[in-house]
Image (cartoon, rainbow, N blue to C red):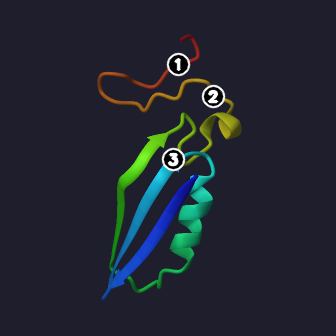
Amino acid sequence: MITADVQHCGSSVLISAGGKLDEHAGVVFQQALDGIAVDARDLMVDLHGVVAMDACGLTGRDRHLGQSDHRVPTPNHPPATASG
């Protein structure tokens, strides 16, 4: 379960997250973002309070796209191909 605390300071907004970042986190973040005025100039997200992130993260990637490789592509670890 994730929690999100929203703080406003002028035209800046800080969303502080805590707990476990899982496939349900997107709903929590969307609710936090829904309360932010469109004229906010700066949006910061503080993830220091996040203790864990499951393989799905925010996207629920394996449920929605049917993919089994959850690695984040980096220069040393490119995305998986169909062959492996």
Q: Determine the CA span between mark 3 and mark 1.
A: 29 Å
Q: Is residue 78 left or right of residue 30?
A: left
The residue tagged 3 is: 20
In the rendered image, the vertical position of residue 8 relative to residue 5, given as above or below: below
Q: Earlier in the sequence, mark 2 or mark 3?
A: 3
Kindly indicate whether the residue at mark 1 contacts the one at mark 2 (C-beta within 8 angstroms): no
Q: For the residues carrying marks 2 and 1, which lies nearer the camera in this image? A: 2
| Residues packed near mark 3 inside 10 Å, few (<14), some (14 to 19) or many (20 plus) | some
Q: Earlier in the sequence, mark 2 or mark 1?
A: 2
Foreground: 79 or 40?
Answer: 40
Foreground: 1 or 29?
Answer: 1
| The quarter of the displayed image where residue 13 is located | bottom left
| Residues packed near mark 1 inside 10 Å, few (<14), some (14 to 19) or many (20 plus) | few
In the rendered image, the vertical position of residue 84 relative to residue 16, given as above or below: above
The residue tagged 1 is: 81
Q: For the residues carrying marks 3 and 1, which lies nearer the camera in this image? A: 3
**Disc number placed over residue 38 in the picture, else none:** none
**Which secondary structure, mark 1?**
loop
In the rendered image, the vertical position of residue 83 relative to residue 33, given as above or below: above
Q: Determine the CA span between mark 2 and mark 1.
A: 11 Å
Identify the residue shown where x is 44% and y is 60%: 17
The residue tagged 2 is: 67
Q: For the residues carrying marks 2 and 3, which lies nearer the camera in this image? A: 3
**Which secondary structure, mark 3?**
strand
Q: Is residue 23 left or right of residue 21?
A: right
Q: Position of residue 65 (x, y in %)?
A: 66, 36
Circle 2: residue type: Gln
Identify the residue shown where x is 40% and y is 64%: 16
Circle 1: residue type: Thr
